[in-house]
Image (cartoon, rainbow, N blue to C red):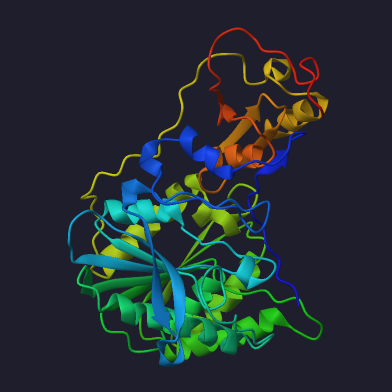
Amino acid sequence: MAWRCLDWLGIIHAPDQESAISRVARLLSPSLLLGSLCLPSQAQRVPLPLDARLNEQIIMVPAGDGMHEALETTVFRPGGPGPFPLLLMNHGKQAGPARQQQRERFIYMATEFVRRGYAVMLPMRTGFAQSTGTYRDFGCDMLANARGQARDVLDALAYARRQSWVDLERIVVAGQSYGGMAALALATRTLPGVRGVFNFAGGLRVDMPGCDWPSALAKAFATFGAYSRIPSLWLYGANDSYFAPALVQRLFHSFAGSGGRGELFAYGPFKRDAHLTLGSRDGVAVWLPPAERFLQKIGMPVRQVYAVADAPSPPDTHFALQGDIAAVPYLAEQGRAAYRTFLGKTTPRAFAVSASGAWGWAEEGESPDFRALASCQRRSSTPCQLYSVDESVVWPGGARVPSASAAGGAD
């Protein structure tokens, strides 16, 4: 069995020996740094620091039979005691073992909801990341898959309802990809205080012999519709690499034709893959307007009531034109080829270099500046610095420095 997955990776190269990734933390704004950093189990995945702007914290939520399991859960919320309306958000399934999947944050979505006075909870389900237990896999049985994941969401919701900072009458449940399907499965139950469900590109693709996964999905979605108790908003883009528009229409008609209360917001192509819209900084302009309209319909707040500053970005130093590959310091031939590749990547993006000749870049997703620095730093014994962010060169001004080859570095 295989799951197709796209992810934004920080690319690394360095001639130097490995050193501690925690050095990266000193190079970023203190407002983003609460909590510790650790080396990831996969080279491409970089753990991000907690975000003080959103009072981000990680808690372990009891779950499972007898509450013997614990779900690694990210919480964002405004300052103060509350109670706050709640967004309970659910993640998808990436390629590879669930245990190796890193904690999901959906930071751009969380920011917009905290601005509107919401608390946000994002549990990693059983077997994912640092959650305990074993990942539930029912192969091509899509209904069993969705219900298996919804069990954890139900436990997380029960935990939330015991917290004094949660408004028990104003709750929305959301999910992206596999998490969207889990949210729809959850909505077949009676859920006090839950007013609506967001389905962001929801579904599951299972590539295995003998599995007609689109038909299996349609059958499961028909069951969701037949027992759905909560209104839902579905958001899918035209160039989604998992779920093409024809399949999305099939799933929605299966759901609505069985009595499901939903509305479909089908938007055009988004960058290289609309399946990743929710995790993109630029995706906010796509999903937020229809989300606000839906929230208004179900009696949830939409007005911004808390000021949350945008994450800081280093200023353009005008050290060189961004396209001047020869101006990038310290790099030998392979590093300059990497920078040339970087110039073709989409924003947000960042490129970092070190006097050791190491370099790293990252595009899209969350905190590409941090990820680029971390990618560079993993292979450098000297500090890495950002050279370029988005369309700007942010390298400090001054005299040009030699390339790694001229300085005796190895490639």
| Residue 206: image location, x then y, percent | 70, 77
State the residue at coordinates (29%, 44%): 308
Question: Which quadrant would the C terminus be assigned to in this image?
Answer: top right
| Depth order, front residue of 330/143 | 330
State the residue at coordinates (38%, 89%): 189
State the residue at coordinates (38%, 77%): 156
Residue 221 appears in the rendering: no
State the residue at coordinates (52%, 49%): 280
Answer above or below: position of 257 versus 364.
below
Answer above or below: position of 204 versus 397.
below
Count of numbered labels shown in the rendering: 0
Answer above or below: position of 24 versus 387.
below
| Residue 84: image location, x then y, percent | 22, 64
| Depth order, front residue of 91/234 | 91
| Residue 285: image location, x then y, percent | 43, 47
Residue 13's quadrant in the figure?
top right
Answer above or below: position of 298 versus 321.
below
| Depth order, front residue of 107/130 | 130
| Residue 24: image location, x then y, percent | 53, 38
| Depth order, front residue of 307/48 | 48
Residue 15 appears in the rendering: yes
Question: Which quadrant would the N terminus be assigned to in this image?
Answer: bottom right
